[in-house]
């Protein structure tokens, strides 16, 4: 096995405007919308920490200050809880503060995911890094990020997470053209297309929001023109790296993920995620699931 630099840093782009959730996101970052009683972005941070990555950079924007506040001390609240002897809630408040080391940088203009990643250049430097998108929640018990880091350690270059989706949904994702390797869950990525029409997609293996990226991506992104939607696309930069050798920052491999993924990028999937998480909570499920069954039995038929 070649001696590739270890992955120690995480970049979490969190500068999007969240227009799909207006008016809720007019003043509240979409990353702070709760999944039951915990903001979505905290699950993403916990996933990174479970993979052993404790150095986190969040790429934020205007009106995202509450993200920084959530991962910072709240002395008045802590004092009130301590005075009440409420150790359980005090622990919940302190947990996101103590879980990792946080850094922040602002993306001044909404120029796309590729531009958001480029904003991390100074912090990351010449090191490989993980990139986790807040719209996708991956169950940390499935070990996806750990597996991606293992693949990077074996092959070098960059690694994307791929999940099989119905053909009619490929236009919602970046889509990969792939070749098999000697490992069942690892493929070589030979092509990438951002949100192709279903009939033009090279496969139905979609890129979901988990990446392990070689630092050569920064040089590529600096020279990547705006692509689909007039934005600088990370997909376009990874396509460039896919054709390179290890010495040039390539290639790109994919991990075929068949585990538990929760999409919070739109209202319907967000609601599904909240229900699924609540149904798995031992403190909520005994009352929530019977209530949900009763509600569904009494609910009027859906109008077509």
Image (cartoon, helix red, strand yellow):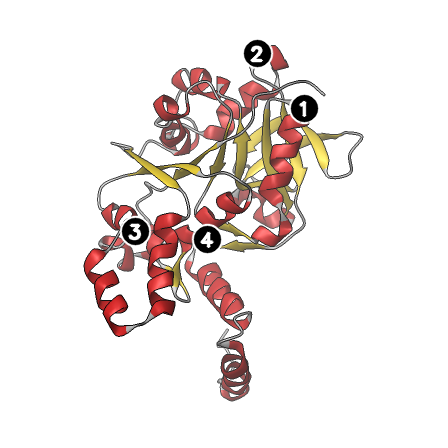
Please tell me whether mark 1 sits on a helix, a strand or a loop: helix
Residue mark closest to the camera, 1 vs 3: 1
Q: How far from the left and from the top, in percent, is residue 294?
A: 53, 87
Give the residue at x 44% y 15%. 219
Q: Nearer the viewer, residue 203 or 241?
A: 241
Residue closest to the far top: 247
Which badge, 2 or 4, is on the more N-terminal residue? Answer: 4
- Residue 93 percent coordinates (x, y): 33, 60
Would you call the spot at circle 2 few (<14 residues within 10 Å), some (14-19), or many (20 or more)?
A: few
Residue position for label 4: 43
**Mark before the other along the chain sequence, 4 or 1:** 4
For residue 201, what is the image quadrant?
top right
Q: Position of residue 158 (x, y in %)?
A: 58, 26
Tag of residue 248: 2
Q: In which quarter of the image is residue 243?
A: top right
Q: What residue does disc 1 label?
A: 155
Viewer-nearest residue: 14 or 173: 14
């Amino acid at each position: 096995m070649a001696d590739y630099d270890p992955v120690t840093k995480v970049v979490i782009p969190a500068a999007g405007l969240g227009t799909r959730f207006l008016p809720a996101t007019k003043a509240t970052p979409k990353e702070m919308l709760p999944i039951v009683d915990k903001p979505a972005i905290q699950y993403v941070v916990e996933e990174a920490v479970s993979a052993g990555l404790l150095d986190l950079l969040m790429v934020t924007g205007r009106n995202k200050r509450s993200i920084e506040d959530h991962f910072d001390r709240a002395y008045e609240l802590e004092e009130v809880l301590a005075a009440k002897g409420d150790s359980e809630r005090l622990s919940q408040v302190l947990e996101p503060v103590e879980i990792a080391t946080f850094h922040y940088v602002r993306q001044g203009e909404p120029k796309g995911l590729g531009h958001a990643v480029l904003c991390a250049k100074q912090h990351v430097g010449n090191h490989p890094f993980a990139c986790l998108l807040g719209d996708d929640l991956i169950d940390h018990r499935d070990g996806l990020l750990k597996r991606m880091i293992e693949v990077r350690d074996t092959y070098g270059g960059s690694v994307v997470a791929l999940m099989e989706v119905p053909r009619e949904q490929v236009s919602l994702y970046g889509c990969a053209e792939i070749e098999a390797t000697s490992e069942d869950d690892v493929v070589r990525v030979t092509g990438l297309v951002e949100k192709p029409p279903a009939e033009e997609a090279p496969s139905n293996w979609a890129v979901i929001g988990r990446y392990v990226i070689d630092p050569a991506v920064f040089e590529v992104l600096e020279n990547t023109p705006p692509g689909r939607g007039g934005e600088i696309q990370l997909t376009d930069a990874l396509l460039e790296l896919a054709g390179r050798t290890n010495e040039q920052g390539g290639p790109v491999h994919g991990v075929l993920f068949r585990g538990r993924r929760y999409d919070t990028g739109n209202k319907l999937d967000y609601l599904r995620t909240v229900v699924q998480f609540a149904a798995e909570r031992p403190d909520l499920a005994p009352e929530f699931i019977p209530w949900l069954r009763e509600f569904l039995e009494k609910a009027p038929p859906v109008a077509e």
